[in-house]
């Protein structure tokens, strides 16, 4: 099974351009009208802080990719100015960007981005449906 | 690492906010859930909405509040497939007319985050209420009678198969400077109003602007008095009792 270090290596081999392109795409979304994916934590404040959990079988390995991807996006968002970020910490848009890029693991093991779910409804810069931003993984 | 990835910059930027590491811990520790956030669910977007919900039903399991209870009790996600929550915000009428039939068709559970006082606003005042309370409605074109908010009858219907959550009383941003009186109204009275009208417990409270439980210690007594079990921010769901 791959571990978190393997995931960081995979991400590094791709370079940062796909991440930056996806951040641009996220900025173009119409949040009032579109479904916006994200991943949020589950925290039991009545339990010990070091409680461990077992997740869905399908995410056994994929969660490491999500964790590594979230950190890469967080590092990129944290480099933005406070004005650009607004009231949220960089990790907030990072969790949504991560969910866009690593929505879930397909049955064949490949990464399914959220745009694949809604691809026929995504409008590219020329106003044509089905467009994909540059740098998609 | 390659030249694309400067580990020093990476470490420095990631360490700027403790919430970043917290999210890393949730992900590695299997303590997370996927959400897709919706606000307006207008007729013109119905095809896309149906496509999304159908996809979710094929690749994920729907999530009931009882599934979260089970997860925290057993410390194990009870399904092989991951869970996904369509999180539907603001209590718009189009949620009942457009989103509910789609969710029901695919047997998928929506979580509806409703400002508890919105349904009580007179229909002729609802558009103004939206403008004054940061509710970005884009669906008013659908309704000539001016009603934008869900009615209580519609919320009662929704509650049969979906989760009804309190998104404050009047879509109110609770800050550290908010008075106790305002907090009580927006946290406690909003929940009581919703429960009175739907005759069911409302166990989830959702902040505006993504605050977390620890952010506002003064709000704790109100959340406890109200009896919420879960508090939602844009980064996490926290079980508080």
Image: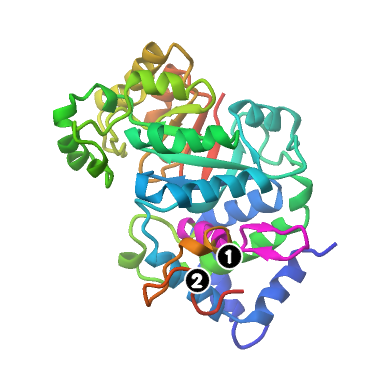
Q: Is residue A1 magenta?
A: no
The answer to which image quadrant residue A79 occupies is bottom left
Q: What mark, if any, has residue B45 been given in the picture?
A: none
Q: Nearer the viewer, residue B112 or B201?
A: B112
Q: Label 1: which residue?
A: A101
Q: Disc 2 and disc 1: Cα gap in Å?
A: 8 Å
Q: Is A31 on the left-hand or right-hand side of A22? A: left
Q: Is residue A99 magenta?
A: yes
Label 2 sits on a secondary structure element that is: helix
Q: Label 2: which residue?
A: A22
> Between disc 2 and disc 1, whose residue precedes?
2
Q: Nearer the viewer, residue B192 or B26?
A: B192
Contact, CB < 8 Å: mark 2 with mark 1? yes
**Image: magenta residue range:** A92-114
Residue B125 visible to the viewer: yes
Q: Dot 2: within a 10 Å radius of its alpha carbon, few (fewer than 14), some, or many (20 or more) residues?
A: many
Dot 2 falls on which chain? A
Label 1 sits on a secondary structure element that is: helix
Q: Is A22 on the left-hand or right-hand side of A107? A: left
Would you place residue B48 above or below residue B217 in this image? below
């Amino acid at each position: 099974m791959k571990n978190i270090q393997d995931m960081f290596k995979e991400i590094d081999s791709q370079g940062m351009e796909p991440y930056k392109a996806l951040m641009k795409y996220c900025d173009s979304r119409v949040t009032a009208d579109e479904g916006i994916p994200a991943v949020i934590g589950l925290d039991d404040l009545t339990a010990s802080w070091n409680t461990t959990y077992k997740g869905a079988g399908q995410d056994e390995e994929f969660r490491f990719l999500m964790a590594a991807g979230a950190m890469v996006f967080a590092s990129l968002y944290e480099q933005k100015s406070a004005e650009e970020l607004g009231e949220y910490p960089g990790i907030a848009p990072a969790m949504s960007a991560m969910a866009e890029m690593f929505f879930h693991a397909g049955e064949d093991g490949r990464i399914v981005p959220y745009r694949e779910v809604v691809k026929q409804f995504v409008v590219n810069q020329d106003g044509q449906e089905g467009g994909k931003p540059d740098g998609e993984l | 690492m390659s030249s694309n990835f400067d580990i020093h910059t990476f470490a420095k930027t990631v360490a700027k906010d403790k919430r970043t590491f917290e999210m890393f811990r949730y992900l590695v520790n299997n303590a997370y859930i996927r959400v897709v956030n919706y606000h307006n669910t207008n007729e013109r977007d119905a095809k896309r909405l149906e496509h999304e919900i159908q996809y979710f039903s094929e690749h994920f399991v729907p999530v009931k509040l009882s599934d979260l209870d089970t997860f925290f009790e057993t410390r194990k996600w009870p399904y092989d497939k991951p869970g996904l929550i369509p999180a539907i915000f603001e209590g718009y009428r189009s949620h009942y007319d457009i989103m509910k039939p789609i969710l029901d068709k695919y047997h998928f559970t929506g979580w509806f985050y409703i400002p508890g006082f919105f349904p009580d606003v007179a229909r002729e005042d609802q558009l103004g209420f939206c403008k004054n309370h940061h509710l970005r409605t884009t669906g008013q074109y659908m309704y000539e009678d001016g009603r934008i908010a869900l009615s209580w009858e519609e919320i009662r219907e929704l509650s049969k198969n979906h989760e009804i959550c309190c998104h404050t009383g009047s879509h109110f941003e609770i800050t550290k400077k908010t008075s106790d009186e305002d907090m009580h109204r927006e946290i406690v009275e909003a929940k009581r109003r919703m429960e009175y009208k739907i005759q069911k417990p409302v166990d989830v409270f959702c902040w505006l602007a993504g605050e977390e439980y620890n952010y506002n210690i003064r709000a704790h007594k109100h959340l406890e008095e109200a009896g919420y079990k879960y508090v939602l921010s844009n980064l996490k769901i926290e079980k508080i009792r």
